[in-house]
Image (cartoon, grey):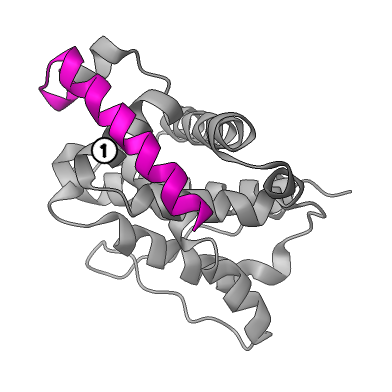
Amino acid sequence: MTSPESSFPPDPPHNESGGESSPHPPATDPSQAEEIARYEPYLRMLARMQMRASYKAKLGASDIVQQTMLQAVAAVDQYRGNTEAEWRAWLRQILVRQMCHLDRDLHRDKRDIRREQSMEQRVAKSSMRLEGLLAGDVGTPSQHAMAGESLVSLAEAIESLPDAQRDAIAMHYLEGLKLSEVAERLGKTTGSVAGLLHRGMKQLRQNFHE
């Protein structure tokens, strides 16, 4: 079985001004494009956690994910994986590549393979923690059996939370930060963060099971 790494798409083309030009998706089965689009909330949640503050104001997570999905559509015929987990890994790799290209374009840096690998590892760990959240605090047995679809729904439910609750849950449950570290990142007290987590998880369960 070919791994998703071996079917990774080529780097996005650059135009003469140094920015990335949008790939033109080839004629493809509309169902493939729809399947990729279905993962938009999942990819947006992961992108939001990895975006540097220096370019958050210039480009939103949704913009990065749009470029990721365009690239995935253009390269979908190269995908050789067979499982849901491999499919998610392939999409995450494209997301990381897009974010690293953006970082280089904004800072005029050379490609940093170690940074890409580090980001890939962080994104993969966040995805694994999302699976853990589904298996533990939020999901039901029937949702565990449909992990791929349920992960997307859980990511969408997290993204729908108020910003402060969403960020606290992402940092604590998906990035693995301690309560004190989340408080420092958000500029709040630990008591305030604990309240955000309590209210956020309550609302998340409600949103996810609607």
Choose between 50 and 134: the one closer to the eye.
134
Camera sees residue 105: yes
Whether residue 6 is in magenta: the answer is no
Residue drawn where x is 39% and y is 54% of the image:
44
Q: Is residue 93 above or below residue 180?
A: below
Secondary structure, magenta segment, majority class: helix
Res 46 visible:
no
Q: Is residue 206 magenta?
A: yes
Q: Amino acid at mark 1?
A: Gln
Q: Specify whether 119 is left or right of 33.
A: left
- Residue at 59 percent across and 77 percent down: it is 33
What stretch of residues is rendered in magenta? Answer: 184-210
- Residue 208, position as x, y percentages in the image: 49, 51
* Location of residue 26 in the rendering, given as x and y in whole percent from the top left corner: 59, 84
Q: Is residue 94 above or below residue 27?
A: above
Where is mark 1, residue-wise? 165
- Left or right, 164 with respect to 188, comes to right
Q: Residue at x 49, y 67 (%)?
A: 69
Label 1: few (<14), some or many (≥20) within 10 Å? many
Q: Circle 1 sits in a helix, a strand or a loop, which is it?
A: helix
Q: 33 or 188: which is nearer to us? A: 188
